[in-house]
Amino acid sequence: MYKSSNTVGLNGTKSFPVKDER
């Protein structure tokens, strides 16, 4: 799953357009 947004992720960090293992 790929996230391409500048919002806060589940781990409290910014979600960059990188591979998300969740």
Image (spheres, grey):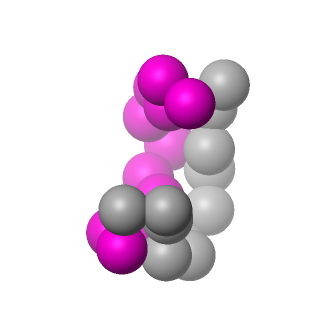
Picture coordinates of residue 7 (x, y %)?
56, 76
Picture coordinates of residue 10 (x, y %)?
49, 62
- Image point 49% across, 65% down: which residue? 9
* Residue 21 among magenta residues: yes
- Image point 50% across, 43% down: which residue? 17
Occupied quadrant, residue 5: bottom right
Horizontally, residue 5 falls left or right of residue 21, namely: right
Specify start and end residues of the magenta stretch as a single range: 12-22
Picture coordinates of residue 15 (x, y %)?
47, 59
Q: Say which quadrant the N terminus sits in.
A: top right
Q: Say which quadrant the C terminus sits in.
A: top right
Horizontally, residue 15 falls left or right of residue 4, namely: left
Q: Which is nearer the eye, 22 or 6?
A: 22
Q: How many badges with numbers are in the image?
A: 0
Q: In this rendering, is residue 4 above or below 5?
A: above
- Image point 62% across, 44% down: which residue? 3
* Residue 14 among magenta residues: yes
